[in-house]
Image: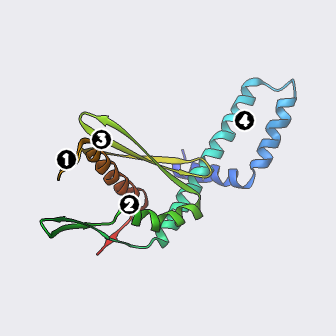
Amino acid sequence: MPNQEMTDRKEAALATHRPADLMEAISRAAMDPTVDVSKMQALLEMAERMQATAARVEYQTALARIQGTRPRIERDGKITIRGVVQSRYATLENIDGVIKPLMDEEGFALSFDTELVDGKLMVAGRLSHRLGHSETKHFPLPIDTSGNKNATQAFGSTFSYGQRYLYKAHFNIVEVG
């Protein structure tokens, strides 16, 4: 029995080279009153699998292109306590400013969502591709109550932290500086 990767490649090759032929065959079959409904259903399922496989392959190919050309991102933010820099990090604005043009060029969109789970903010980042494939990563984060933040600022800080780390996770971003 062939492995899943080989099956995916074969379906992706078929989907990218002959989607119009398959859709034409399905259309012809749909108009024929003698066509077995179960065979029609099987054809539609095969077409959906082929389309999903092609979308996943293009997603992975586009992501590989971004990762092959991605710039390193400077740590432009800093946490200062009593006048002393304690740590440096790449700000969300800096990460987005560098990665967004690459995402746009390759047909990606990144969206975020949150949910409070067991006292932690679960931050989810969904990376979607124009052909329909998407992947979601999650980070459960403790609410950032450091400094003099009020409750709203604590959630905002935690969410921003999660966004930065989800960008980094999806695109394998390396910070420098």
Q: Which residue in the protein does label 2 denote?
A: 92
Q: Residues within 10 Å of mark 3 (few under 14, many from 20)?
A: many
**Front position among marks 1 and 3:** 1
Whichever of callouts 1 and 3 sits on the residue coming sooner in the sequence is 3
Question: Could you tell me the amino acid type at mark 4?
Answer: Leu
Q: For mark 4, does the 10 Å Cα neighbourhood hold few (<14), some (14 to 19), or many (20 or more) residues? A: some
Q: Residue at x 23, y 44 (%)?
A: 150
Mark number displayed over residue 145: 1
Which circle marks residue 43 in the picture?
4
Is the residue 64 above or below the residue 120 in the image? below
Badge 1 amino acid: Thr
Q: CA distance from mark 2 to mark 4?
A: 45 Å
Q: Which mark is residue 121?
A: 3
Q: Is residue 64 in view from this perspective?
A: yes
Of label 3 and label 2, which has the lower sequence position?
2
Task: Specify the label residue 37 is tagged with.
Answer: none
Report x, y in % for residue 135: 47, 47
Residue 45 coordinates in the image, percent (x, y):
66, 35
Closer to the camera in the image, 143 or 3: 143
